[in-house]
Amino acid sequence: MRLTFLGTGTSTGVPTLGCRCEVCHSTDPHDNRTRPSLLLEYTGRAVVIDTSPDFRHQALRQGLDRLDAVVFTHDHADHILGLDDVRSFYLRDRIPIPIYADERTMGSIRRVYKYIFDQDYPYGGLAKLDPHIIDGPFEIWGEKLIPLQVFHGNLPVLGFRFGGVFNRLQHHSGVDGGAARRARGVDSGRSPARAAPLSLDGGAVTELGGEAEAAVGLLHTHRTRASSRSHQRNTTCKRSPGLRWP
């Protein structure tokens, strides 16, 4: 399995509109961070976790030429507002694209994208989606994903364990003991320099890594403009085989 971070920025992205800080004016391309999304590639399949508003740009940059499924962690705008762009894959192949989300998130997706589910848009060009409710472990094209409930502020959201090694805990501020015991390796949604308001701080990330017996180190997403590339070099964030940053 190959895992690629398509975007690791906070909800505004980095640079942030109207910001005059050093990071937002950095010439280092690593300080340009699109909104959070993840690509899993295995056995010739491509599965995306979360379609951010930057999904089209991310897919073009990555050279993504197929999409076999989309999995959602929660229903915030920076995680679902790129879903319309999956229509390019549907219109080419004419195969409905499976999407997976818990009941709450699927309800929000159906509301936001009512025109897709109703299929009554008079001008055509719509995707067709094949919705699946996540209510326990599930398989996508032979790969088992185990959902882990974590908290984004007081909002329950989903993380995922997959591949026997990797876990995706997207933009969270707390993990219950059961989820921590199931994780044993954590990708944490947190900027080490300054937490987004609903994310873990650096000390909590380190503590969680110990509690979960992290197997592959801590991999950070939702990095804010307070976190520069130079700071990233000094964090405990470690790369592991099979992980890629484009």
Image (tube, grey):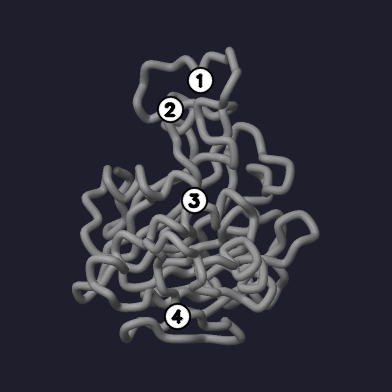
Using a 10 Å C-alpha cutoff, classify the residue at mark 4 as few (fewer than 14 neighbours), some (14 to 19) or many (20 or more). Answer: few
Residue at point 38%, 74% (across, down): 97
Q: Residue 135's spot in the image, x, y percent?
A: 61, 85
Q: CA distance from mark 4 to mark 2?
A: 36 Å
* Residue picked out by circle 3: 52
Residue 130 marker: 4
Is residue 165 found left or right of 15 in the rendered image? left
User: Looking at the figure, which quarter contains the N terminus?
Assistant: bottom left
Local secondary structure at mark 2: helix
**Is label 4 or label 3 in front?**
4
Mark 1–mark 4 contact, CB under 8 Å?
no
Q: Are marks 2 and 3 in contact (CB under 8 Å)?
A: no
Tag 2: Cα neighbours inside 10 Å, few (<14), some, or many (≥20)?
many
x, y (%) of residue 182? 57, 77
| Spatial separation of the CA atoms under disc 4 and disc 3 | 19 Å
- Looking at the rendered structure, the kind of residue marked 2 is Asp
Check whether the beta carbons of the residues at disc 2 and disc 1 lie within 8 A of each other. Answer: yes
